[in-house]
Image: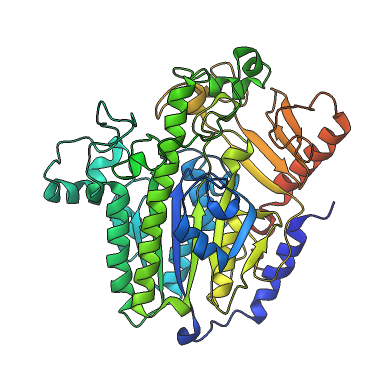
Amino acid sequence: MALFMDDFSRRVFLQSATAAQAPVAARPNVLVIMFDQWRFDCLGANGNPLIKTPNLDRLAARSLRCTNTFVQAPVCVPSRISYLTGRYPHCHKNRVNYTPYRGAEPMLQSLLQGAGYKTGSVGKLHFWPGTNAHARTTGFDMVQLDDGIPRTDKFSDYVTWRRRNDPQAQLVHYNETEKGQGNPFRAKIDRQYTPTAWTGLETRRMLRELAGGAAPFFLFSSFFKPHAPYTVPAPFDSLYNGVEIPLPRAVDLAYIRSLPQPVQRMILRFKPAYDTDRALLQWMWRSYYAGVTMLDEEAGLILDELEKTGKADNTAVFVLSDHGDQMLEHGLFGKNVFFEDSVRVPMLVHAPGRVAAGVRTELTEAIDVLPTILEMCGVAVPEHVQGQSFLRGGGREMVFCENIMPEVITNGGTGYPWAPGKGIDGIRHPDAKMVRTERWKLNYYPGNGGELYDLANDPGEWNNLYAKEPGRVAELKGALLDWMATADENGQIARHWEI
């Protein structure tokens, strides 16, 4: 097996020959639009005939559409930090939500800021501490913040804005619904005062401000939706009335008990939902689709605003997702597992004159976004970055993902009873690793077995071959070992010697 680090090492050690930065006038602006918990199959351009995403579909038709992009963790914070540092979670150490950013590795916004870019962020960052002031220390010049959950409302610029502007500010915007409507998830809050509308509004305002300056800009626009709860305002709530969306295969407790123990525990935590009423599930899917369509409208408005600024031809646009959503696939809502619905995400890249439109089917990792943007902007890629730019073509032989969610396993909050050598609540080692090739996927849970899926013949991941294919398991475990040993070699074997 040829290790991807060989190519990575070759590239970073050649960077000294090209480290000189491009003239400022030649540098593109960068606009990143991120949705939270957006499934790969919930985009018309990716083959979904039911979902309404006309603006993103039009963008996809003139963009590079990546169809095999995988996140490095199926949970918000580790995934987002991987996007922004170009490093794997076990290296940047933000392994669970609401863990402090150590600042040891510079983020994308800091690297661009240091190269003369003006930087801004609107919406969900999910950093900790979750304050506007802290976000600025990571490299953002301007910040408008809303992480989307009650525990961070005290930090939210959106919540402050809504209290000043919404005549019905007393309504709970997360999940307060209208009773007696066709869609049980119809939100009481008016559309114009939703977090989605605010994020779009502030993105357009900040875009105008950044585009009016002399410096190139980087703008990170991050929406909370389509993340649960599935509340959606009128008129989007009725958009899919009467549409029968194909629902996930129903599972029973016997199937769940056949999965490795950590996966069982995730599915059965809190109040298990695997037997959710199918009629209610249909409304959840309709509302999830409606949330995506509302995001599509906001994305269209942002792209229209970009055109109005006159900067569209010199702006690289990335549309991304931090992870997917099971939507009751395999009996689970949310994420935290390695099924395709959680780890495979949409990605569109529109960069006129820099990236040709088309379809990229090669395996790509989320950490590849940072070096791609830096190369596009003429900024040297730091040696510690583990991603690889896909501007020069070529994909990966395999992609990796990892997950450690002790607060999920223990049904706890921010604390959990972990002790070295003893594990967490009966799980000896809750850390899990995934390796996926074009055909095979191994999910390995040390001390708790694993899952092996033949994706060519079992794309739904129902037939676990872990016990039936020991040779294949051993081969892929070897790939995991090589990855763990070499992923951070530029940090372990660096030029630190003084004599």
Position of 19 relative to 227 (above/below): below
Q: To which quarter of the image does residue 490 belong?
A: bottom right
Residue farthest to the right, as pictured: 471
Give how far across and how far down residue 234 sits, in percent.
Answer: 28, 43
- Residue 444 shows in this picture: yes
Q: Is residue 193 left or right of residue 485?
A: left
**Which of the pair 397/182 is nearer the observer?**
182
Image point (21%, 46%), residue name: 159
Which of these two is toward me, 495 or 189? 189
Residue drawn at point x = 75 percent, y = 57 percent: 4
Compared to residue 173, the image places residue 395 above or below, namely below
Instruction: In the rendered view, tell whether residue 423 sits above or below residue 245.
Output: above
Q: Is residue 485 left or right of residue 107?
A: right
Report the quarter where the C terminus lies.
Answer: bottom right
Residue farthest to the front?
Answer: 242
Image side of residue 300 versus residue 275, left or right: left
What residue is shown at x 22% (from left), y 48% (from top)? 193
Q: Position of residue 496 (x, y in %)?
A: 64, 63
Specify how the rendered protein is coloured: rainbow
Residue 303, how many percent across, how many down?
40, 67
Residue at the outermost top position? 254
Where residue 373 appears, as percent x and y from the top left, is: 54, 68
